[in-house]
Amino acid sequence: MAVAERQHDLASQAATKPAWTAVLHDWVTTADHKKIGIMYILMGTVFLVIAGAQALFMRWQLVYARHDFVSPDVFNQLFTMHGTTMVFFVGMPMIIGMANYVVPLQVGARDMAFPRLNALGFWLTLFGGLLVYFSYATGGAPALGWFAYAPLTTKTFARSAATDFWALGLIVSGFGTLTAGINFVATIVAMRAPGMTFRKIPFYPWTILWTSVQILIAIPPLTAALIMVMFDRQLDAHFFDPQNNGSVVLWQHLFWFFGHPEVYILILPIFGIVSEVIPVFSRKVLFGYEFMAAATMAIAFISLGVWAHHMFVIGMSRTLDMYFAAASLLVSIPTGIKFFNWLATMYGGRISMASPMLFCMGFLAMFLIGGLTGIMLALAPFDFQLSDSYFVVGHFHWVLIGGTLFGLFAGFYYWYPKATGRMLSERLAKWQFWLLLIGFFLTFGPMHISGMLGMPRRIFTYEADRGWELWNQISTIGAFIQAPSYVIFVWNLLWSLRHGKPAGDDPWDAFTLEWATTSPPPAYNFDSLPVVHSRRPLWDAKHPDDPDWQYE
Amino acid sequence: MSNSVDPTGAGVALQARTAALATPPPIEPEHTLSPAMWGTIAFLVSECAFFGTLIVAYITFLNRDTTGPTPAEVLSLALVAVTTTCLLSSSFTIHAAEKALKRGSMGGFKFWWAATITLGVAFLAGTAYEWTGLIRDDGLTISTNLFGTTFYTLVGFHAFHVTAGVIVMLTILGLALRNKVTARQEAAVAPVALYWHFVDGVWIVVFLVVYIIGR
């Protein structure tokens, strides 16, 4: 009797959905690269909302001259946490998360090389973020700016433990990022499907490989520098302590030796996403694959030698100014190669303007402008005039939103059907795109002008007679036009999960291996390991009469 | 639902038209290191960047102190020559251990592996002796001056890496003594040996910078 009852219980349990505790346990303990990728992206989305709210607070403070919506100290905390969060807990997790989901599928592997290390990396990143936010529990977040120049980080200026939480959180999440880099290298180099030589690897994993190389070289110096900050604060060491001949300039060098490759860590994967989306939606192969591959390598290497263009105004020698200006300008050559190759891929193609391609178009137009203001700032004499002004703020938001974020959205719209089995709403995508584009133009365009009119970044208010008020008001209006676009995006993610059009395995008639398996893919990705003969293995499978390997 | 073409279905239809489809060239097997080795190499690249940063800081602050003690006053070349010999020879013993494992000689493996651990521990003991003297007799701590700050950070992080290596090697020795390590575990031992060679290589640079150039 009891046995029969229990069997009945089990049967009814199986029929209903598993308890939420079981689902939670499954996600918390998972080592599946797809689930970890999704968790990274969810983490990034949550922090995007937090850091976005911080941006809106700042914009509202600056809407009028002498406005007193937030106090100067709170304003300092806001821009510190906004920058730190957006770079380390939005940009990096989203990029690593998307690569985590897609790269093993694209190279035809069943998981990352080290699945448990992968889980460790995610949890380190998440808890690193939480540690940084613990600083609020000390009475207020650090007020340093995201690059935390010494001696602001010394005990004299940062008296509470907020700075320690900030440094510790970045050390912890840095280890998480490092494990991801190690994992990507091992996966991409040693786990490719049979036949997928380096000359046949899809372009996205190729960019992730070089992103990982940059992670390996750029993150440890930041970790070391943050450890020095901790030693200075906790053990009375003297690294950045000018009273004992320590050097505040050393911090700048170490930070930017990390900081500049970091911006390429945030853009190279986007180049990869765009290089996947544009060919599929132009119905052509990627133009100049070899040149694109070489340009990616070139950017990865050149980016390691340009860091001091962030430091032109600290008074380096003229020789160093000239070297760093020239090296920075050099980056525009491989980037230009990429740009023209994307245009050549589209040229003569049968272009479809579905949502992923729409965001790629936005990326191409916006990243071009951000790249051009970058070339302006690389010229040392120009930088002398505009360093630390709103022109710089306009420039880097133009590449980080116009470049990184537009590219990430292209990736979201492209791969969401694979991850969920449902299409995202195209109508909401168009609303999101146009609100974002217009809001983005209005927010960051005027910053170039207010910067040239002399407005320094990071000031909490300004006098009415400086002529900056109008430009700041346009920026604030733009920010409030942008804000709903993110709400629409999150709503689209949630709504389409239940109500989206079923996607099928290959909704975009694409070329690479992730579309050869089901949507969403099974835990083991592929029933049997795929064999690859060309750069477009799925095209070969769909067109056995005219396979690519005949021409490559 | 899906507008993808079923490969087999398309193949059947096409086979009627083109009697024989072209067959792709055979796949050449690719020879590369294991994922574990690539992961280790990637990790060690990041370690190079980490130690590189600490060494840059050490060199930046060399001879910038206004108060003593200075490296020339307190660092003993005789002591560090002994510890350096211990550490460098442990690279040879771990190589011998690997070769023994490859041969399947478990006795040889255990002997050379234990010898490597002993040399690593000897190095750490030497460092502990050196630090005790520096702190107690010379009054040099991490907060004394820039030399103390950079010296303890650089040498300390290296000693931390030696300690981590010793702990991992002790774990493997424990497994070997319980006969859980055979020639089949060579692939698991190789990354540890590579790490150990790296720790030795870093020490050569640290030795040159701290005890030869900086003294």
Image (tube, helix red, strand yellow):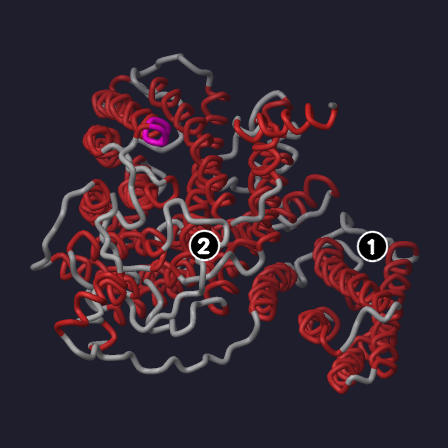
Q: Let me know if residue A71 is in the magenta part.
A: no
Could you tell me which residue is drawn at 61 percent across and 32 percent down? Answer: A22
Could you tell me which residue is drawn at 42 percent across and 27 percent down? Answer: A49
User: What kind of element bears circle 2?
Assistant: loop
Q: Which residue is mark 1?
A: B140
Report the front residue among A339 and A111: A111
Relative to A297, B153 lies left or right: right
Report the front residue among A347 and A441: A347
Above-or-below relation of B41 to A11: below
User: Residue B102 location in percent, x, y?
Assistant: 73, 84
Which span is picked out in magenta?
A493-498
Please tell me if label 1 and label 2 are on a single chain.
Answer: no
Could you tell me which residue is drawn at 33 percent across and 73 percent down? Answer: A199
Relative to A12, A394 lies left or right: left
> Pointers 1 and 2 in contact (CB under 8 A)?
no
Neighbour class for label 1 at 10 Å: few (<14), some, many (≥20)?
many
User: Residue A501 location in percent, x, y?
Assistant: 27, 34
User: Residue A131 location in percent, x, y?
Assistant: 61, 34
Instruction: Report if residue A535 is visible in the image.
Output: yes
| Numbered mark located on residue A525 in the image | 2
Amino acid type of the residue tagged 1 in the rendering:
Leu
User: What kind of element bears circle 1?
Assistant: loop
Q: Let me know if residue A496 is in the magenta part.
A: yes
Label 1, label 2: how far apart the Cα atoms are = 58 Å
Q: Main secondary structure of the magenta part?
A: helix
Residue A464, quarter of picture: top left
In the rendered structure, the residue with mark 1 lies on which chain? B
In the rendered structure, the residue with mark 2 lies on which chain? A
Above-or-below relation of A467 to A248: above
